[in-house]
Image: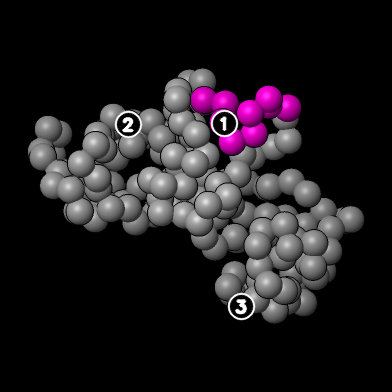
Amino acid sequence: MRLWPLVRDLRPYEWRKEDTVAALSKLCGCTEQEFLETNHLAAGAPIPPGSRVILPCWSAVYRLDPWDTLERVAKAFGFKNIKELARLTRADLSAMQSGAADIRLPGWHFVYAREGDTLDAIEQQFRLPSGSALTVGRCYHPWPRLPFPAKY
């Protein structure tokens, strides 16, 4: 399996006391200006904890390879079965099976790891279930819950 193109997407996020525009924009792989414009914020304006902001991030679109099955894709991305995958992706099951449709993966968003990030910290930051944050790709890493930081 391989992920096909990443698509720019928006994800709601609750601002925390320790958050900064610089840190969140780096996490999203955008500039601070893009982050501010997305949220209609002025530079330097205080953002109170608990405020809802939008994170510009990436969502996944998956294109079936010839050897893929929908059952395999559903299992790999945490869906109960192919009917749930079709319902949540709002895709036509027959088009998905023929490989004629890209499968948008709802709930799957991609962010850039920053120096010092761990998958556990990312799960806490986004209030995700333990063990649900994953690294993309299968490169060797001696500490599997410690992603490689992005290099810009």
* Residue 51, horizontal then vertical, whole percent: 19, 53
Q: Nearer the viewer, residue 25 or 149?
A: 149
Q: Is residue 32 magenta?
A: no
- Amino acid at circle 1: Pro
Q: Which residues are magenta?
A: 140-149
* Residue 103, horizontal then vertical, whole percent: 66, 62
Q: Where, by quadrant of the figure, is residue 108 drawn?
A: bottom right
- Amino acid at circle 3: Arg
Q: Earlier in the sequence, mark 2 or mark 3?
A: 2
Q: Is residue 142 magenta?
A: yes
Q: Nearer the viewer, mark 2 or mark 1?
A: 1
* Residue 59 can be seen in this image: no
Q: CA distance from mark 1 to mark 3?
A: 32 Å
Q: Residue at x 56, y 31 (%)?
A: 146
In this rendering, position of residue 128 left or right of residue 1: left
Q: Are marks 1 and 3 in contact (CB under 8 Å)?
A: no
Q: CA distance from mark 2 to mark 3?
A: 35 Å
**Within-10-Å neighbours for mark 1: few <14, some 14–19, many 20+:** some
Q: Nearer the viewer, mark 1 or mark 3?
A: 1
In this rendering, position of residue 3 left or right of residue 55: right
Circle on res. 23:
2
The colour style of the image is one colour
- Residue that numbered label 3 is attached to: 87
Q: Earlier in the sequence, mark 1 or mark 3?
A: 3
**Within-10-Å neighbours for mark 3: few <14, some 14–19, many 20+:** few
Q: Secondary structure at mark 1?
A: loop
- Amino acid at circle 2: Ala
